[in-house]
């Protein structure tokens, strides 16, 4: 049943291989716990046993976020069993999960990003530095994910129309517009790549014509963002958060940001409104006469 479920995720739900592997590991851990503690099969599991697993995970020191991720796999599995009529009741349906901390995503402020980009552009001296600068700029200008960037095909970057077509999670395509200034920088990279006669099927390649790895992009972004001391995290996802936060702060509609990011649910996008609210609180505190006197 577990293998049928994983095939269902791969071929019908179009989950990525990494997600399927994570689900497999979580389900194997859950099944082992159920067998060791209760000596029953998965179709016999009830809500008490699911809660017992959550308690065991807490006792192991797992954070609530990790428990939520593991429970996501278990919940999806039992929904599948219910769908194929292997169980009559989903034992996870009424199980309460530990409360998640409300944590705001890290992002780079607009003024800081302007300084960072200006400094980075001055360091462009050869093909590799041009490519690295353009990778960073593309992530910031589009909000695309790291995996989406490394898998980007040249045929999906239309500089004439100023759009880029991205293949996101579950093979869903979305089109992201490119600004005029961003297009100029991308053209410089394309010209440099063509002069070096490098493979152009994959849009971003190193000086050997090889597709970039996700690890390389992570380290690249980490190096760039190291000049922003206020950041706690320096991953490519920070640029995605920065894109969304700055769009919202400058008046973009939340639904439009949702579509640009490729979110399935608006609830995933709404976290960025918290950053805006925090900014409003700071403005209020510094500007309102009652607050300034206190």
Image: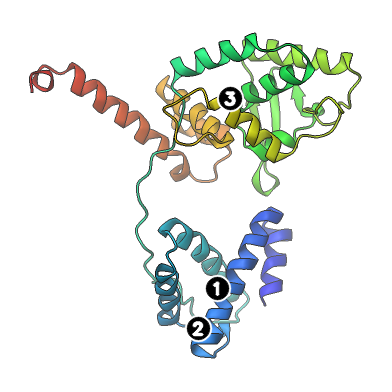
Looking at the picture, does residue 2 appear above or below residue 8?
below
Q: Measured from the top left, where is residue 66 in percent x and y?
A: 48, 59
Q: Which mark is residue 113?
A: none
- Secondary structure state at the residue bearing disc 2: loop
- Secondary structure state at the residue bearing disc 3: helix
Q: Which mark is residue 78?
A: 1
Q: Which mark is residue 45?
A: 2
The disc, 3 or 1, on the residue closer to the chain's N-terminal end is: 1
Report the mark closest to the observer, 2 or 1. Answer: 2
- Circle 3/circle 1 CB separation < 8 Å: no
Near mark 2 (Cα within 10 A), the count class, few <14, some 14-19 or many ≥20, is some
Whether residue 167 is visible here, answered yes or no, is no
Q: CA distance from mark 3 to mark 1?
A: 44 Å
Q: Quadrant of residue 181?
A: top right
Which residue is depicted at the point 41% across and 59% down? 64
Q: Which mark is residue 224?
A: 3
- Secondary structure state at the residue bearing disc 1: helix
Report the mark closest to the observer, 3 or 1. Answer: 3
């Amino acid at each position: 049943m577990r293998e049928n479920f994983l095939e269902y995720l791969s071929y019908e739900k179009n989950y990525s291989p990494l997600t399927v592997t994570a689900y497999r590991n979580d389900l194997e851990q859950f099944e082992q716990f159920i067998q060791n503690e209760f000596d029953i099969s998965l179709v016999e599991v009830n809500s008490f046993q699911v809660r017992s697993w959550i308690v065991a995970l807490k006792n192991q020191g797992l954070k609530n976020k990790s428990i939520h991720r593991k429970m996501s796999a278990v919940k999806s599995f039992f929904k599948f069993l219910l769908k194929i009529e292997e169980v009559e009741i989903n034992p996870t349906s009424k199980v309460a999960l530990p409360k998640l901390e409300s944590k705001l995503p890290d992002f780079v402020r607009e003024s800081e990003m302007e300084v960072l980009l200006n400094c980075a552009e001055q360091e462009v001296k050869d093909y590799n530095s041009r490519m690295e600068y353009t990778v960073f700029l593309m992530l910031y200008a589009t909000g695309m994910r790291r995996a989406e960037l490394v898998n980007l095909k040249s045929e999906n970057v239309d500089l004439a129309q100023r759009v880029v077509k991205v293949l996101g999670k579950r093979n869903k395509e979305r089109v992201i517009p490119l600004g005029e200034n961003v297009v100029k920088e991308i053209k410089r990279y394309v010209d440099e790549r063509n002069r070096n006669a490098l493979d152009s099927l994959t849009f971003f390649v190193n000086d050997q014509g090889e597709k970039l790895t996700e690890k390389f992009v992570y380290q690249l972004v980490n190096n760039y963002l190291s000049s922003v001391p206020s950041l706690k995290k320096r991953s490519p996802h920070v640029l995605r958060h920065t894109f969304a936060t700055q769009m919202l702060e400058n008046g973009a509609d939340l639904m439009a940001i949702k579509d640009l990011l490729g979110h399935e649910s608006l609830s995933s996008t709404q976290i960025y409104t918290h950053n805006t609210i925090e900014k409003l609180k700071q403005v209020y505190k510094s500007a309102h006469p009652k607050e300034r006197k206190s």
